[in-house]
Image: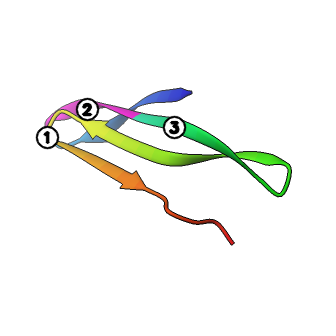
């Protein structure tokens, strides 16, 4: 699953994307265990090891 948006910056609009993946079942509900946040100037990845 992915969500795309644009952020207004002093230099104009900057495209941004959040990607959710590696879904696993936790207490009967599918949860993403990987979240990636992408912009032109950086790429951040969060890997979840446990949900309590």
Mark 3, mark 2: which one is toward the viewer?
3
Residue on which the image places disc 1: 41
- Residue sitting nearer the eye, 27 or 36: 27
Within 10 Å of the Cα at label 3, are there few (<14), some (14-19), or many (20+) other Cα atoms? some
Residue on which the image places disc 2: 14
Q: Quadrant of the C terminus?
A: bottom right
Residue on which the image places disc 3: 20
Q: Is residue 28 left or right of residue 12?
A: right
- Mark 1 or mark 3: which comes first in sequence? 3
Question: Is disc 2 in contact with disc 1, using a CB cutoff of under 8 Å?
Answer: yes
Q: Which is the main secondary structure of the residues drawn in magenta?
A: strand
Q: How many marks?
A: 3
Question: Looking at the picture, does residue 3 appear above or below residue 52?
Answer: above
- Residue sitting nearer the eye, 19 or 31: 31
Question: Is disc 1 in contact with disc 3, using a CB cutoff of under 8 Å?
Answer: no
Residue 13 is inside the magenta segment: yes
Q: Quadrant of the N terminus?
A: top right
Which residues make up the magenta segment?
A: 11-17
Question: Is disc 3 in contact with disc 2, using a CB cutoff of under 8 Å?
Answer: no
Give x and y (percent) for residue 4: 45, 27
Residue 52 is inside the magenta segment: no
């Amino acid at each position: 699953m992915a969500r795309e948006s644009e952020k207004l910056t002093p230099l104009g609009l900057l495209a941004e994307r959040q990607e959710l993946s590696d879904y696993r079942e936790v207490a009967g509900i599918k949860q993403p265990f990987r979240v990636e946040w992408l912009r032109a100037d950086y790429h951040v990845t969060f890997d979840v090891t446990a949900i309590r």
